[in-house]
Amino acid sequence: MKEKIQRAVSIQNRRARFDYELLDTYTAGMVLVGTEIKSLRLGKASLVDAFCYFHNGELWLKGANISEYFYGSYNNHAARRDRKLLLSRKELRKLEGYVQSPGVTIVPVKIFINDRGLAKIVIAPARGKKVYDKRATMRERDDRREMDRAMKR
């Protein structure tokens, strides 16, 4: 049996944790075409300005950029197309309940490739932070950094 050498692919939306208060997290599968998964394995994706929405009882990812595959000829995919997310009915109902409350949206947090080679996305219902909450987050991060520096000395 030959060994698979696979580097870890993890594309994160760092801005999501700063701009939003994440209420819960869910791991979902993604419906992708061949050139999209190849591009993801190369790490050519971005979750900036991406969000999830419901359409006909299904959850869709909008605004995520998975760059075109370099060797993809005429079969290449559109970089910013909407992608269907795969969740159980129970999880979809919970997420729909979150979205019904005002000020809550569903944001993608991270895309990764699992042990079986399938692309997964971590999504979270989130409520937007106020400016003073963002300042408090920055202050906490700076304090933590200074405490770590003091401990190293």
Image (spheres, rainbow, N blue to C red):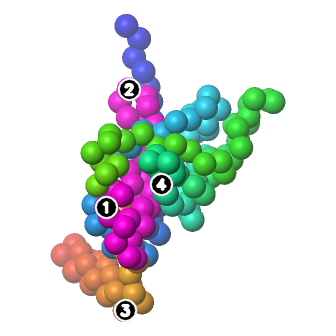
Residue at 73%, 34% in the rendered image: 76
Q: Is residue 152 magenta?
A: no
Question: Disc 1 vs disc 2: Cβ atoms closer than 8 Å?
Answer: no
The image quadrant where one finds the N terminus is: top left
> Where is residue 118 drawn, in percent x and y?
44, 31
Distance CA(mark 1)–CA(mark 2): 31 Å
Q: CA distance from mark 2 to mark 4?
A: 28 Å
- Residue bearing the label numbered 3: 132
- For disc 1, the neighbor class at 10 Å (few under 14, some 14 to 19, many from 20) is few
Q: Nearer the viewer, mark 2 or mark 4?
A: 4
> Is 108 placed left or right of 46 in the picture?
left
For image coordinates 18% across by 75% down, the residue present is 151
Q: Nearer the viewer, mark 3 or mark 4?
A: 4
- Residue 114 visible somewhere in the drawing: yes
- Amino acid carrying label 2: it is Arg
- Please give the name of the residue rendered at 27% of the width and 45% of the height, measured from the top-left corner: 90
Query: Label 4, on which residue?
Result: 54
Q: CA distance from mark 3 to mark 4?
A: 31 Å
Q: Earlier in the sequence, mark 2 or mark 4?
A: 4
* Secondary structure of residue under mark 1: helix
The disc placed on residue 116 is 2
Q: At 31% from the left edge and 61% from the top edge, which residue is drawn?
A: 97
Q: Is residue 31 left or right of residue 34?
A: left
Task: Look at mark 1 in the image and give the residue it sits on.
Answer: 97
Residue extending furthest toward the top: 1
Look at the image and tell me in which quarter the C terminus lies: bottom left
Q: CA distance from mark 2 to mark 3?
A: 42 Å
